[in-house]
Amino acid sequence: MEKSKRKLSLPAWIFIGMVAGILAGLAFLKIPEFTDEWIKPIGTIYINLLKFLVVPVVVCSITAGVISLKDLKRVGSVGVKTFIYYMFTTALAVVIGLVIVNLFKGAFQPLSSTELGDLAYEAAEAPSVMDVIVGIFPDNLFGPMVSADMLPVIVIAIFFGAGILAAGERGKKIGALVEDMNEVVMKIMMMIIKITPIGVFCLMTNVVAVNGPKIVGTLALVIGIAYLSYLIHVVVVYGLSVRFLSGMNPIKFAKGIYPAFICAFTTTSSNATLPLNIECCNNMGAEPEISSFVLPLGATINMDGTAIYQAVATVFIAACYGMNLTIGDMAMVVLTATLASVGTAGVSGAGMIMLAMVLTSIGVPVEGIAIIAGVDKLFDMGRTALNITGDATCALWISKLERNKKAKVAAK
């Protein structure tokens, strides 16, 4: 009897796609316009397919998640724990970023007035705290879905699910329909996920071909500092969380989250990675109703990687202007970056808007963003991968808490 051939797993194919993309990007270093015109569009199609699925996934999964929780009090309990976890890890991320970047601050050289005079960056207007709060609650059912404004979409889904629960018997038929629709959306999601290796290859090829030559000098140092901070946060904060809060081996977690991690690294979008992240967390043992609720929320408000980027970029830009940040300034960076993460969408490039908010809060010229704007994509790849990893650690922890709660109730 012939042994059946063992097929490569999706993570293996994604890894192959990433490595092949890096090699292809290096081969096209001198002609990046070719990858930009012919290879990047294929990757863009992959991203578009993921984005097309984001709103259906969020609406169906969160609504189904709320329904499966079966109790409005439980919905509130899970929501509060999730929010506290996300805010705490984000604050830790900013602190880690500030500590690491200050260790290397002496290597940053102030730029001359001539060099600074040529800089120009028009920052998007930062919303006020009240604007963010008001914007969470939509005045139109379909508007947020069309624009993929995720906080209002999440609120719509939560209210819809809560309404189904509150309706009791009358709501059960609608609840069954939502759960069936969620199953259909998940099947579509798996179809798209299967082409992830191709999307990763195309996106990575273009990133390397376009940005490869720009990784020089001080910018290379700043990028290295950011990635060192990302690594420390993953190993220390997420490693301890997975080990002691979720009771899982960190190595097992790393293997489980790998497909979503690579997808986030190449797409630079937490929202686009959401379908794959849900699948990875469920495969690692997260409760489906918890991952369906916690992960979409995390893709919108949990920005640990982006928070580290704010800290590193702020100190670097301030140094370029010859400014030394005080302890009070750094405390303001922690506060502003943590709060800003709540109102920043999980889309590629959103970190630049957050950075403008942080710089403004401590009086650093926003124009300094132009210094690093050219390599923002390289920062974005790492910070997005970190963001979705943090979402997954929360889903696993909340799932364990809910399982323990169920076990205690069953034991009575």
Image (cartoon, helix red, strand yellow):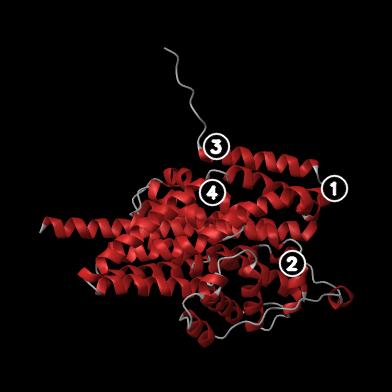
For the residues labelled 2 and 4, the Cα–Cα distance comes to 31 Å
Mark closer to the chain start, 2 or 4: 4
Tell me the crowding category of disc 1: few under 14, some 14 to 19, or many 20 or more residues within 10 angstroms, Cα based: few
Q: Seen in the image, is 90 located left or right of residue 176?
A: right
- Front residue of 313 and 346: 346
Which amino acid does the dot numbered 2 rest on? Ala
Quadrant position of residue 59: bottom left
Looking at the rendered structure, the secondary structure element under dot 4 is: helix
Q: Residue at x 20, y 69 (%)?
A: 169
Alpha-carbon span between mark 3 and mark 1:
29 Å
* Residue 373, disc: 2
Question: How crowded is the residue under tag 2: few (<14 C-alpha within 10 Å), some, or many (20+)?
Answer: some
Asked if disc 2 and disc 4 are in contact, CB closer than 8 Å, the reply is no
Marks 3/4: CA distance?
A: 17 Å
Q: Residue at x 45, y 43 (%)?
A: 251
Which kind of residue does numbered mark 3 sit on? Ala
Q: Residues within 10 Å of mark 3 (few under 14, many from 20)?
A: some
Measured from the top left, where is residue 42 in percent x and y? Answer: 68, 49
Q: Quadrant of the C terminus?
A: bottom left
Which quadrant would residue 230 be assigned to in this image? bottom right
Q: Nearer the viewer, residue 37 or 142?
A: 142
Q: Residue 31: give its label.
A: 1
Look at discs 2 and 4 and give the one toward the viewer: 4
Q: Nearer the viewer, mark 2 or mark 3?
A: 3
In-front residue for pair 309/35:
35
Relative to the observer, which residue lies in front, 372 or 19? Answer: 19
- Identify the residue under disc 4: 192
| Residue located beneath label 3 in the image | 12
N-term-proximal mark, 2 vs 3: 3
| Residue 405, position as x, y percentages in the image | 22, 60
Q: Residue furthest right?
A: 114
Determine whether the residue tagged by mark 3 lies in a helix, strand or loop.
helix
